[in-house]
Image (spheres, coloured by chain):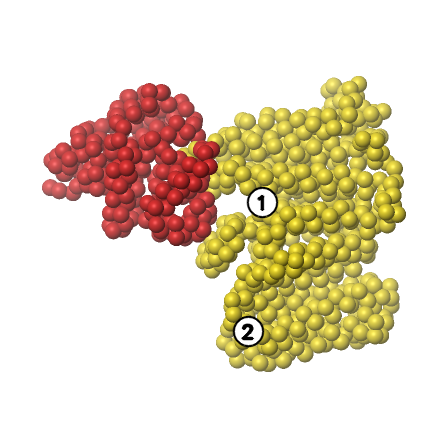
Amino acid sequence: MLEVKNLQVAYGRVRAVKGISFTVEQGQVVTLVGTNGAGKTTTLKTISGLLRPEAGEIWFEGKRIDSTPAHEVVTRGLAHSPEGRRIFPRLTVEDNLRLGAFARKDKAGVAKDLQRVFNLFEILQARRDQPAGTFSGGEQQMLAIGRAMMSRPKLLMLDEPSMGLSPLMMQRIMSTITELKSEGVTILLVEQNAQAALSLADYGYVLEVGKIVLQDSGKNLLVDEAVRKAYLGED
Amino acid sequence: MINIRRLVTPELQQRYNRQGRILGLVGGVLLIIAPFLPWAYSSDALDNMTVLGYPSPLQFFGLALGVIISAFLVLQQALTQRQKKRVRVGWVPGAKAAATGALIYIALILLSIAAELGGLVNIVYGGWIALVGALLAFIGTRLIPAGRTPTLAAATAPAPLEILAIAVMMAAALFAAAFALNHDDAGSFVTFIAFVGAVVAVMIRSGVMGWLSAVSQRYRKVLIFSAFVVAFMFPFTQGGSDANMSIATQVMIFAATAMGLNIVVGLAGLLDLGYIAFLGAGAFVAAILSRSAFSTVGFHPPFIVVVLISGTVAATLGLIIGSPTLRVSGDYLAIVTLAFGEIFRISMNNLDGTDGPLLTRGSNGIPAIPDLVLFGFNFAQRHELLGIPLGRFSNYYFLLLLVLGLIILVFTRLNNSRIGRGWVAIREDEKAAEAMGVNVFGLKLFAFAGGAFLAGVAGSVKAHQDISVTPDQYVFLESAFLLAAIVLGGMGTVLGVLVGATLLKLMPEKLRFVNEYRLLIFGLLLVLMMRFRPEGLIPNQRRQLEFHEEDEELAERISEEIAETGTVKGAT
């Protein structure tokens, strides 16, 4: 479904992604794990068209998208829930969600998806008329995921959904991702929390300073000794 | 700065609550009595304030404030029990606003008398009694605890009553506009504006304004229709005199241009410092294509076509300026538009046949632009309707009313559309908006060029109304005033910007002494606004949050209101 080939991205002269390749298949949850500065967020931003690659190709559903503008990438069926949530704090929950469906023109479908998000996160329904900035971090993350879902994406990209959340809230978010997966949503998940990400991913890639150093199924990576040492804090 | 709320602590209010009430009532009653007494030695000051037992209009307004103070204080006592119900009227906050307003109002009247007659000795005992009354009322009401915030906005009345309320509000607006314009001396004008300000403050504080805006939400069509009717009726209050109508048309052009800029600045959040150049471009195009003897081209299409060409030329200029600059961050746009405004003015000066091609006749501009003739209707002629004569400026006033109505329609349509939501997202977080599928560059360019088009349309009418078009009418200062009107009134709102534009254009026209110091006064006004009410006179509530983010009470109140009315107000 998504194929990234030898992707290289640079900020000025600093190269953040140094030639990575990976694929995401329909219905899979694929995760990119790695420490700060490994190039995970840069990769996602490049896929969604917010950054332009220096070299390499990005193919989505058989079409090359690495020079497609960001707003068109969304209409192709790729949704990006950005790092740090970046909800619109002064807009109400509903306005936030409706903005997620900005690229769509089917009113009835949007209304249906709005209800679907409200079913997924009941707290959002209860607070649909409140400014989103008054929410806790976890609630904002739910809103960010819900907002990304509103474009009815074929592929949902989540950037650090567990960032800055309490363990309890993190569990909630992770179980939501599992729920989405069981509904058949294809997900590309970027996480620093490797344990949580790998335990629900079908396949995982480990990034280190802009390169993929390891790749395997989530299960295997979870028990991989090198991964356990480097990312799961075990000696 | 002295903060009265810090000076008069809640403990103090608890202790002197009773005394405060009595003091406030005494002050209110004094304010009611004083207007029946003479205030000035000579009838030359303001309106005639020398008669015993017969209040002049301005004195009568003081009486009205006195009635409000006393009645609110009495009613609050009498209705305390009933107020426990769902609907809570802000009697005390209303009385406080009335007392503050009365103090300012009376002080301004006394100062005007002193200024116009030469010294405070010209104030007679009635004036001093009024001042004492206002002072007592001010101190007294400050000592009363404000109580809980009013919830009048949630109240509903039978439909005919609510529609009647809208009609009354509109009639009051028409009366106020006619009254203000018909008073030629500065003192009367200023004091009357102060009175209007006081009444509005009372209405806001007591919750009446909240109720009215909720009602307006329910009957939007009635509101818009009646606002249009009132604006339409204004020329009929002038009895064929062109003096005020000339000012009114100036205000209309200014307001229409400000509304166009409001789309760019208020909705899309783009800081355009050279907007006046688009108005100028429209005016020059219309002048050159007019049948003026000084026109420099041989092509003179009918005015309807000219309007479209003017708008298109302005929009094209907007596209040329916008497409390279809108890709980069906002500060660049401000600098580029600022420069563009200057380039426009200098270019118009240079297209005089010696420094460049002969197009605008340089600094002389194009004079003798003939009046419009639309569908056989000659704008130069006096017409009579229902026996009331309507002069040349009234004709243009009606046309401009149509243009303004059109721009407001475009504004509200855009604001409530998908595009409007995209603009909000861009204002809030450009990167996130992009990730949501908002075509950031496209929407910005659309706002920029669309705003330019509307300014071009307004400019084409302005050319005919002004008779001549010269480059020095379109200087940076005018762009700054347009922006000031928007900031002063309330960015992104229709009503706010209309009020801001009216105030800013009317004040220098009506007050000659302001005209001389208008930069000083506007500068001061803007600084004060930024300090005390950065969201503008009539704020968009979503924007109010932007400026008072730390204010949780406000956030709560607004979300409550949104829950009650189901919409975000202020964008009316």
Q: Which residue is mark 1?
A: B492
Image quadrant of residue A3? top left
Q: Dot 1 surroundings within 10 Å: few (below 14), some, or many (20 or more)?
A: many
Task: Give the mark nearest the N terminus, 1 or 2.
Answer: 2
Q: Quadrant of the N terminus of chain A?
A: top left
Q: Is residue A46 visible?
A: yes
Residue under disc 1 on the same chain as residue under disc 2: yes
The residue positioned 67% from the left and 34% from the top of the image is B455
> In front here: B330 or B14?
B14
- Residue B150: x %, y % from top left: 55, 65
Q: Which chain is red?
A: A
Which secondary structure lies at badge 2?
Answer: helix
Q: Is residue B509 left or right of residue B204?
A: right
Residue at 58% in and 55% down: B214
Residue drawn at (78%, 68%) of the image: B59
Residue at the image point whose x is 52% and y is 77% from the top: B14
Q: In the visual, does B565 lie left or right of B240?
A: left
**Is residue B327 found left or right of B92 in the rendered image?**
left
Q: Is residue A217 above or below residue B69?
A: above
Q: B507 or B217: which is nearer to us?
A: B217
Image location of residue B113, percent across then percent down:
80, 65
In this view, the residue in front, A12 or B426, is B426
Q: Is residue B119 something one can see in this rendering?
A: no
Residue B82 badge:
2
The amino acid pointed to by label 1 is: Gly
As drawn, the chain in yellow is: B
Amino acid type shown at disc 2: Arg
Disc 1 chain ID? B
Q: What distance separates the C-alpha of mark 1 from that of mark 2?
A: 39 Å
